[in-house]
Amino acid sequence: MISKKTYFIVLSFLISTIFSSCRKGDVVVDIYTAINDNGSGTGTVTWTKDKNYMLDGFVFVNPGQVLTIEPGTVIRAKTGQGENASALIVARGAKIIAKGTAQEPIIFTVEGDDLKGSIPVEARGLWGGLIILGNAQLNNEFNEAKIEGIPLSESRGIYGGTINNDNSGILKYVSIRHGGTNIGEGNEINGLTMGGVGSETSIEYVEVISNEDDGFEFFGGSVNCKHLVSAFCGDDAFDFDQGYQGNLQFLLAIQASSLGSNLAEHGGNASLTNATPFTIPKIYNATYIGNGQLQSSDLINFSNNGAGKYYNSIFLNQLNGVKIEYTNGTSDSFNQFQNNNLIFENNIFYDIEANNNSLILSAYNSSGDPLYPQQMALQNYLFRANNNLYNPGIEISENTINILPTGNVNTHLANYPSLWFDTVNYKGAFDPNGDNWLNKWTLVFESGKLQH
């Protein structure tokens, strides 16, 4: 039996060989518009749905440039590892206007994808991903950093600054599929990477499907997002780091059938103790669904002073619960819990830690020492904060998930802030009595069920 890595290398080679061109007699006929970058970036340009685009290598939208993508446009990327990887990077000071519709989403995928099943749904690591960089605040020493996933020698990979209301453009009804190329040892590209992206950027109705690394990663910044899907990724579904403090609502995370790390990871800054601002996203109406079998992954992991706030959400089918790091520091993640920066209120947990309420929220440290006072504080907090352990009525089978809950998700709701968040009368990402916002534009939704 060949290894998983060998399988995807062979698959990438076959895709590249078969689909990068077609033959008519002895003449090679170009079937796509190749997009590459000699340093000048894309320019200020519009990509239209009547053309087939192929990213060839790392392609940047340079500072001052605006890339507009019409609804219904499909952007494919050449396969390749390391220096041969392909990705689209919106540099700091540039903009992307990718405003699709439910009927005509904008799709980023790998070369050879006919959008009819030629690429297996859970094929990963076949190209890079989409990276957006901005001028918003981080908690790094100089409030700037080089983004992971692209070579350190690339100067256009810098992100961060002091403009928290920075505007990097619009993503709406965008599907990002089969990415996560490894460009170096342990250095994969996330599906959608956001570095220092500001609050005037608009991101809603975006899915990342089967990325080799994280689905969405937020490195600092203050961008607000609604209606995000992260499914079948090889690492975390959502990853928050470096002082990210945005608002998020209607998040769906689904682990792959046999791999993946955490449904969400909340970190701070691993190299700078007590670096501020702290990572504290505010999240309403998430639905996180694990695969129920991985000992190595958590529902949510908080570490390196990372925090965050979850309200009116549904969490189910994960062996391990919420893990909160305790280091006896002045601002470790457990201290963030004590200071009301780490909150779980009015949520539903089911099939998490075998429904053992004493372990749903738990403290840990690197030494493995027992943390009885901390554990007792978390255990007492769970129900005091109006969280419940019962079946929300989301049916999971081997190949499908009935994503609309049939259980009681309409009572004991936390209040919604008056600004930005939609006020709804249900927990989780989906209204059990309303329209399913996954319909038409996503890869895996069909006939009321998620297919995988």
Image (tube, rainbow, N blue to C red):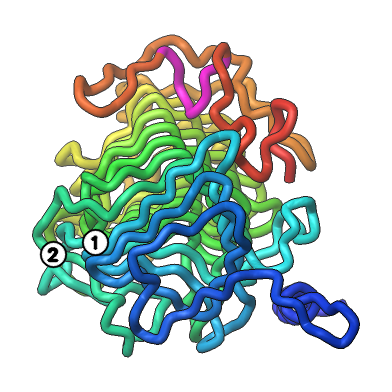
Dominant SS type (magenta):
loop
Image disc number at residue 399: none
Residue at which label 2 appears: 161
N-terminal label among 2 and 1: 1
- Residue placed at 68% from the left, 42% from the top? 444
Q: Which residues are magenta?
A: 425-432
Quarter location, residue 53 = bottom right
Percent coordinates x, y for residue 4 in the rendering: 74, 74
Q: Is residue 271 above or below residue 230?
A: below
The one of 360 and 236 positioned closer to us in this rendering: 236
- Residue placed at 70% from the left, 51% from the top? 257
Percent coordinates x, y for residue 42 in the rendering: 39, 71
Q: Is residue 226 above or below residue 222?
A: above
- Tell me: 143 left or right of 57: left
Check disc 1 and report its element: helix, strand or loop: loop
In which quadrant is the N terminus drawn?
bottom right
Q: Is residue 295 visible?
A: no
- Tell me: 293 left or right of 244: right
Residue at which label 1 appears: 134
